[in-house]
């Protein structure tokens, strides 16, 4: 199964000590699940990400953004080799006074272990209409490039070669790109106003079938030639 | 843009179910909001939740929820928040299905008076 986007969804839960969100469709066994959180405070308030299928979520990225134009924190979590079935994800927070906005995504065809390859992210403290990260270099040919950003008060548009997935309340944006050759690139998208922001790129490896290669035997041409 | 109102009332501890209401295929987004100016006791936990049905109410699936204790809350711009809200999307569906939605307010630890609220569907 090749790497592919399956579904996504997002929610603005306001100030909450926990928020739950269900995937639109049943999650397929083995999928990669990615979660992006924008919390309206510079404090790392997330105490847990879990779901009702028992998948394990790992944080791939976190940055605190104290800039007055975008006071927030930005986290990316992921779960590999998802259990099949209807899935509701819950985030819990130690502080309910900060607003919680988050997005969930499902991808098929990702590695079911050690899927995370590259991570890069930063707070962009100089106002700009470009939201971006530093470059990363993928190590495998087939990878998912997953980009997320937080900002305040602008409308985002996907970067070149990327596909927009979730755009929430002019504050959170996600996009992705699936590549078939190694490359050095950054995560980037544009916004409608010059603003400060955060941006992260996380890359995930495709599932690779391991094990000994089967011998195919002589080629058809060789077999045909030998028959004469 | 259908709007399902939540009347001013004193909410008691426990679950209050609102709806269901029909949601046409043209609509895919909701904003559920509730006046929480009197929800100040941190021992009182409030949860807003929303469900949808694609078979006219025969079966229901959970969509999303938000939970918080009582207290004073501020928006990102520093203004006082007078409501608790939940904003997300419905499931895209094919024509012909009879989609409905219902939402709930779960209070644990006590109740509080509310000026009401609404579920706006766009």
Image (cartoon, coloured by chain):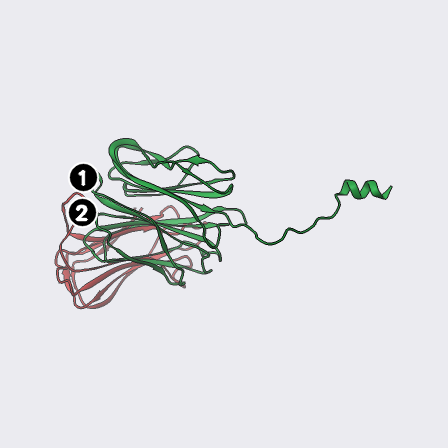
* Residue under pointer 2: B75
Q: Nearer the viewer, residue A77 or A139?
A: A139
Q: Nearer the viewer, residue A74 or B107?
A: A74
Give x and y (percent) for residue B75.
Answer: 18, 47
Q: Are marks 2 and 1 on the same chain?
A: no
Give x and y (percent) for residue A95.
Answer: 20, 56
Q: Is residue A131 visible?
A: yes
Spot the red chain and give its letter.
B
Which corner quadrant of the image does residue B76 belong to? top left
Label annotation for residue A68: 1
Q: Is residue A153 above or below residue B91?
A: above
Which corner quadrant of the image does residue A169 belong to? top left
* Pair 2/1: label in front: 1
Spot the green chain and give its letter.
A
Q: Is residue A159 above or below residue A140?
A: above
Label annotation for residue B14: none
Chain identity of mark 1: A
Give x and y (percent) for residue A78.
Answer: 39, 52
Q: Secondary structure at mark 2?
A: loop
Q: Is residue A199 visible?
A: no
């Amino acid at each position: 199964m090749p790497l592919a986007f399956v579904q996504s969804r997002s929610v603005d839960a306001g100030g909450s000590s926990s928020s739950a969100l269900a995937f639109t469709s049943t999650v397929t066994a083995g999928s990669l699940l990615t979660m992006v959180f924008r919390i309206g405070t510079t404090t790392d308030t997330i105490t847990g990400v879990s779901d009702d299928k028992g998948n394990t979520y790992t944080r791939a990225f976190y940055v605190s953004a104290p800039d007055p134009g975008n006071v927030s924190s930005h986290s990316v979590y992921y779960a590999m080799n998802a259990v099949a079935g209807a899935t509701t994800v819950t985030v819990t927070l130690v502080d309910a006074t900060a607003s919680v906005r988050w997005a969930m995504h499902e991808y098929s065809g990702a590695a079911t272990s050690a899927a995370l390859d590259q991570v890069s992210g930063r707070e962009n403290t100089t106002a700009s209409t470009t939201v971006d990260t530093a470059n990363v270099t993928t190590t495998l040919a087939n990878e998912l490039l997953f980009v997320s950003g937080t900002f305040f008060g602008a409308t985002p548009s996907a970067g070149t070669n990327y596909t927009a997935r979730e755009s929430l309340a002019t504050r959170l944006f996600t996009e992705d790109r699936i590549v078939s050759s190694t490359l050095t690139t950054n995560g980037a998208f544009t916004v409608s106003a010059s603003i400060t922001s955060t941006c992260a790129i996380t890359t995930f490896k495709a599932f690779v079938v391991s094990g000994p290669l089967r011998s195919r035997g002589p080629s058809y041409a060789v077999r045909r030639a030998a028959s004469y | 843009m259908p709007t399902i109102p939540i009347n001013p009332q004193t909410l008691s501890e426990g679950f209050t179910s609102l709806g269901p209401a029909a949601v046409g295929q043209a609509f895919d987004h909701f904003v559920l909001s509730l006046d929480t100016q009197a929800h100040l006791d941190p021992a009182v936990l409030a949860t807003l939740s929303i469900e949808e049905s694609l078979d006219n109410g025969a079966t229901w699936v959970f969509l999303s929820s938000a939970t918080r204790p009582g207290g004073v809350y501020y928006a990102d711009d520093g203004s006082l928040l007078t409501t608790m809200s939940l904003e997300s999307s419905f499931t895209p569906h094919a024509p012909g299905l009879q989609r409905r939605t219902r939402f709930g307010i779960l209070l644990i630890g006590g109740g509080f008076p509310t000026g009401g609220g609404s579920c706006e569907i766009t």
